[in-house]
Amino acid sequence: MRYLEEVSTLKLDRQVCIGCGLCAMVCPHGVFSVEEKKARILDLDRCMECGACARNCPVAALAVKAGVGCASAIIYGWLTGKEPSCDCGGESCC
């Protein structure tokens, strides 16, 4: 499942990453893979900003504004039938 394109707050610092693979294990949407002993974001637009990856990263190589982004607004819109609004103020905002 993909959400809005190019709005996810997810960031990965590959230099800090130790390649433990926890992010790939806990991500409910398969955003990550581990290649050459480093995590890699496969599809940023699949991120629903739940924060599981960042909370489980032992070296803080991941950052995401969990529950406060455009993806969260889209999910809320789907559940309520209302027009999504994330109040991000960006050009490509939902």
Image (cartoon, rainbow, N blue to C red):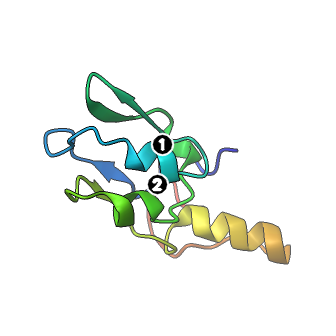
How packed mark 1 is, by other alpha carbons closer than 10 Å (few <14, some 14-19, many 20 or more), is many
- Mark 1 falls on what kind of element? helix
Q: Is 19 situated left or right of 24 in this image?
A: left
- Does the image show residue 5? no
Q: Nearer the viewer, residue 39 or 3?
A: 39
* Residue occupied by mark 1: 44
The residue shown at (45%, 70%) is 66
Looking at the rendering, in which quadrant would you find the C terminus?
A: bottom right
The residue shown at (41%, 49%) is 23
* Residue occupied by mark 2: 8
- Mark number for residue 80? none
The residue shown at (26%, 28%) is 37
| Snapshot quadrant of residue 10 | bottom left
The x and y percentages for residue 56 are: 37, 61
- Mark 2 falls on what kind of element? loop
Rounded to the nearest whole Å, what is the CA distance between mark 1 and mark 2? Answer: 7 Å
Q: Residue furthest left?
A: 15
The x and y percentages for residue 50 are: 52, 65
Q: Residue furthest right?
A: 81
Q: Nearer the viewer, residue 25 or 51?
A: 25
How packed mark 2 is, by other alpha carbons closer than 10 Å (few <14, some 14-19, many 20 or more), is many
The residue shown at (27%, 38%) is 19
Check contact, mark 1 vs mark 2: CB within 8 A: yes
Q: Nearer the viewer, residue 84 or 31?
A: 31
Q: Is 71 situated left or right of 40 in this image?
A: right
The x and y percentages for residue 21 are: 37, 41
The x and y percentages for residue 4 are: 60, 51
Task: Give the residue type that dot 2 points to.
Answer: Ser
Task: Mark 1 or mark 2: name the one nearer the start of the chain.
Answer: 2
Task: Give the residue type that dot 1 points to.
Answer: Leu
71 over 88 or under it: above or below: above
37 over 75 or under it: above or below: above
